[in-house]
Amino acid sequence: MAGVLEALGGLGDQLAHVLADFADPLKPAWVIEQAVERFGHVDVLVANHARSSKQSLEQVTAAELDLAWAVNARGSVLLTQAFAAQHDDRRPGGRVILFTSGQHLAPMSLELPYAISKGAIHQMTASLSEALVDRGITVNTVNPGPVDTGWASPELTRQVANALPAGRWGRPEEVARLVRWLASDEAAWITGQVINSEGGFRRWVK
């Protein structure tokens, strides 16, 4: 996190940072409150948080299913709710950008809590959009595909790269460009969509 904050120019008038555990149902609203207190209002919400969870059907537990759902899916809904509550309809625009994964394109049977909770985000997109469209607030979801943020092992990096036509994982800046566009006035006519941006990922290639 320190590296990300430094790359963004460091804490100051244009950048603030808080830590929150979305397993606590009160924290999503608290995060929005902190942003409003610091900057006066929030025009764009990008909910790209995630709890990764690797459990197969044989391993899966109720506790992990509940936790993944609470952090990933419930957290996204409550963030959207809090964002909408503070958004002044007299201000132009209003953008909500959520993140899903590729569970709608291929099975993810070894990480069921994660895949199921991310699937909920995919399915909530149209309904959240409908709830806010009359206020001029758009809601869209991004599936960024495999993105190289340094978390994967060398073996997994090579394996996945073989299934990507470019021979490499996506880069954070490639995801950021899509998010920036969705947050802009140019995307004002786009809402309720799940956008796959993963470089032609061929999941069947090993």
Image (tube, rainbow, N blue to C red):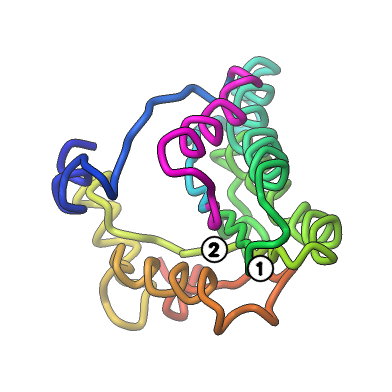
Check disc 2 and report the residue beneath it. Answer: 143
Q: Quadrant of residue 107?
A: bottom right
Quarter of the image containing the N terminus?
A: top left
- Number of numbered discs visible in the structure rendering: 2
Quadrant of the frame with the C terminus = bottom left
Mark 2: few/some/many CA within 10 Å (<14, 14-19, 20+): many
Q: Position of residue 201 (x, y in %)?
A: 46, 74
Which residues fall within the magenta stretch?
24-45
Q: Where on the picture, by quarter, is residue 67?
A: top right
- Closer to the chain start, of discs 2 and 1, is 2
At mark 1, the secondary structure is: strand
Say left or right for 169 vs 71: left
Task: Name the side, left or right, on which 197 lies relative to 102.
Answer: left
Disc 1 residue crowd, few under 14, some 14–19, many 20+, Cα 10 Å: many
Q: Residue at x 56, y 79 (%)?
A: 185
Residue at 53% across / 49% down in the picture?
A: 42
**Residue 33 lies in the magenta stretch:** yes
Q: With 49 as the anchor, is 152 left or right in this view?
A: left
Tag shown at residue 194: 1
Task: Please give left or right for residue 206 compared with residue 36 in the image.
Answer: left
In the rendered image, residue 30 lying in the magenta stretch gets the answer yes
Q: Position of residue 72 (x, y in %)?
A: 60, 37
- Amino acid type indicated by mark 2: Asn
Measured as percent of width and height from the top left, residue 62 is found at 70, 17
Whether residue 8 is situated above or below residue 32 in the rendered picture: below
Q: Amino acid at mark 1?
A: Val
Marks 2 and 1: CB-CB under 8 Å? yes
- Callout 2 secondary element: strand
Above or below 99: residue 63:
above
